[in-house]
Each structure stands twice: as C-alpha cells, then as structure tokens.
Amino acid sequence: MDLDLRKRKYAYLLAKVGANVQPGQPVVVEAAVEGASFTPLFAEACYKLGASEVLIRYLDLPNLKTAALYRPAEYLQEPAEWELASYRTLLAQGGCYVRLETENPALMADLSAAQAGAVFTHQDRLRNACRKICRENGKQWLIAMIPTQEWADYILPDVPAEERLTRLWDLVTGLCYVDDDRDPVATWAAARVRVHKIADTIDAWHFSRLHYRAGNGTALTVTLTPDSRFGWPPKDPDDDSLDFTPNMPTEEVCTTPEKYGTEGVVYATRPLVLGGKALEHFGFRFTKGRVTEVLAEDPEVKKQLADLIATDEGAGYLGECALVEYHSPISMSGIIYYTTLIDENASCHLALGRGLNSGAVSDPAFTYNDSAIHVDFMIGTPDMEIDGETADGTRIPVFRTGDFCCPDFQG
C-alpha cells in the first residue's frame, strides 16, 4: 500500500474508531512535535467526521529535557496553569482528547533518575487532568502512536537506515489492521467481538483471586473485588455516553483489583519507558497490596522506581491487572517497541497507581486504589501460568504456556 494512503487510513481509523469524533464536537490533540507531518492528516479526518474545531498542541520532549537540566524537579513536574487552562476550555465544551505520542528512548538517556522522573510526572499529570475532565463529562479520549525517524532508528537498527521509518509505519499501522486486504474499521469490530467473549468468559467464573507463576521468579497473588469485571456490562438505556477505543492498538482484557490484596513477587519482562528513559531488569515485592521492595540491580533504575512509588499514598499499590496472550500479534512481531502503549499489548501487565474503576466497591470490605499516577509494566512470559480462584477455593486454569487455555476462550 502506498505510504501516504496508509497514513490517511490510519488517521481515519483513529478518528472514527478510536476517538469516535462526533459532528459539532471540538477535538483537543496533544501531539509529539516529531510527528508534526502526521497531525494535519489526523485533523483532516476529524473535520471530515464533522469536528467543529481541532486544536493541536505539541508535546515538545526535547524542550522538556532542556528544562529538566536547568529547572528544579518540583517546578518542572507540575504543569503550568495556563497549560491546563487551554485544554479545559475546549474540553468543557464537550470536546474529546487525543494524545498522539512517539518514542525516542535515547533522548533522555543522559538524564538522572530525578530529572527523567520530573519529565514523566509533567506529562502524566497533564494527560491525567485531561482524561479526568473527559471521564467527568462522559466524553472520549484516545492515545495512539506516530512513527518517527528517531523511534525507528532506535528499535530497528538492523533495517537499512533509509527503510526504517517506512518499516515502522508498516508495523504500527498493521497492528491496527491497516493493510491492503482489509477494511480496518470492520476488522477492528470483529477483533473486539473475540475480546468481549474472553472477558465475559472470565467474569462468568467470579474469581476472587488470580495466581501468577513464571520461571523468571514471578509468584504473585492478586485479589479481585466483587466488582472486578473484565468485560463491559450492558449500557443503561439512559446512558448517552459514546463508545470509543482509548488505546490503539489493544489486545488486552483488564480490571481493577482490590487495593490491599496483592502478595508476592513479580518481575518485568519488557522495558518500561518513564520520562523518555528506558528502565529494564526490575521487579517488585508486594505485601498487603503495597510495594515493599523495588528489585533492581541498577541503582538508577531502583531510584527512579522508588521515586515513582513515593509519588503519593496510592502510587505503590496496583490499579490494574490485564491479561494478554504471549502469542499475540504484537508479541509475535518480535520487536520491543519501547512504548507502553504497544508493549503492554504484547504481554500480561499490571499497573501501579490509579484504578480503572473509581468510586466505592459495592462491598465496603473492598477498596479501589487511587493515585495521581497510572503506570503499566509488562510481566508476560512464554511459560506464564495463571489460575483463577473462586470464592470456595477452587482453582481454574486461565493461562498455560503464556496463553489462555480454556476452550471457551477461543474465538
């Protein structure tokens, strides 16, 4: 497929299936400055769907890096009021929020853990503020990736330099079903049917705990609440909120666990990029839900993760557990993408911080976590085993050899 056509089909897919832009709706876009050539295509797709205005604000990570070198971390990590005000204005008018990211893991390599942490916190707080407004207003949000030369050079060093960017466009758009042979909107809808079936199958067991085991030392138990659903309940007839797909691509089914019920040790299996800095070879020990030890030999990695879980009271507890087959299309591409948005869909993962669900659990004996952060880290392995435990103590195999094992999970 011609690259320009591929980009236009991708832009339309993001606007239609991802953000589900509505006629007369404003669209607030935070876009990586390195991907500026793509944003007009996305804006055009939004306007063709009837958007009233598309406001593009550029995320300038090279400038944030410079600021991190010269400004105290406590000043950098908090977005300025003027920065938030421009987003609030349009979002308050019923707008949707779109974040078009890219990655350059080499950019922040020379920053200290504290400096990289400040860059991450600045971005994360701005993003979370926008998503909070969308949730409160019942509006859509979307996070997706823009392939860029810097990202392609980092993750595709074995591809000839002049071919890397095109190859990365082929990869990223292919993971979102944009190719010569398929209608991406229809293909996306069909793929979601299978994911919904998997989620409903898990929910039918009403698991109270999930037990994780892997040969790398992971031995973890995650407690679920009575409301920890992996699927989506039928919409209330009075609910006029719009369907949208907040992450593209996506392969996961996920839920919010009990705040205080995680026990054991878990090890990350893919890099985690925080503030543009790639962290590898780490794990966590949990006791009564909370991270009580960061497991990492590299002192800089250990410090950045320790600083992360010290962000606030909830930062050291889990807010999400997500199930993704090891032999998923993203994993089978054989590439580490160095961006959580894609890598989390190649692997089972957990997230520190804010829960996907908010408010109170129906049973007051259980609690959802809350925090200013929500940071996913990948834990899936080809030998991962997961058992679900029911209320009477019965264990049901859910994962074997890295994938769903029950025949009911098959599409």
Image: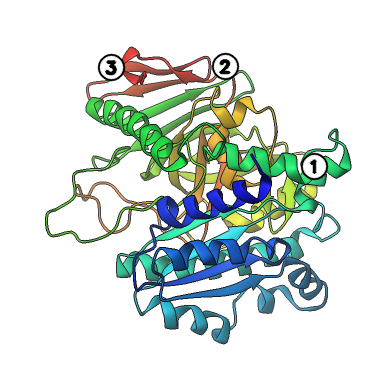
Q: Quadrant of the C terminus?
A: top left
Say which residue label 1 marks: 164
Q: The disc labelled 3 sits on which kind of residue?
A: Thr
Residue 191 image label: none
Image quadrant where residue 284 sits:
top right
**Tag 3, which secondary structure?**
loop
Secondary structure of the residue carrying numbered label 2? loop
The label nearer to you, 3 versus 2, is 2
**What residue do we see at 31% from left, 70% from top?**
137
Check disc 3 and report the residue beneath it. Answer: 394
Q: In the rendered structure, which disc, 3 or 1, sits on the residue that comes first in sequence? A: 1
> Where's residue 87, x and y in %?
49, 78
Q: Reading the chain from its start, which is encountered first: label 2 or label 1?
A: 1
Q: Where 72 falls versus 145 (above or below)? A: below
The answer to the question of whether label 2 and label 1 lie on touching residues, with beta carbons closer than 8 A, is no
Residue visible at 58% across and 62% down in the picture: 41
Instruction: Give x and y (percent) for residue 333.
Output: 65, 28
Q: What is the three-letter code of the residue carrying label 2?
A: Asp
Assess whether mark 2 and mark 3 are in contact (beta carbons under 8 angstroms).
Answer: no
User: Callout 1: few (<14), some (14-19), or many (20+) C-alpha neighbours within 10 Å?
Assistant: many
Q: Is residue 133 left or right of residue 119?
A: left
Q: Position of residue 32 (x, y in %)?
A: 66, 64
The residue closer to the viewer here, 151 or 314, is 151
Q: Is residue 267 above or below residue 353?
A: above
For disc 3, the neighbor class at 10 Å (few under 14, some 14 to 19, many from 20) is few
Residue mark closest to the camera, 2 vs 1: 1
Q: Give the mark, 3 or 2, whose residue is nearer the N terminus.
A: 2
Whole-number angstrom distance, CA of label 2 to CA of label 1: 32 Å
Disc 2 marks which residue?
A: 383
The amino acid marked with disc number 1 is Arg
Residue 106 in percent (x, y) is at: 82, 52
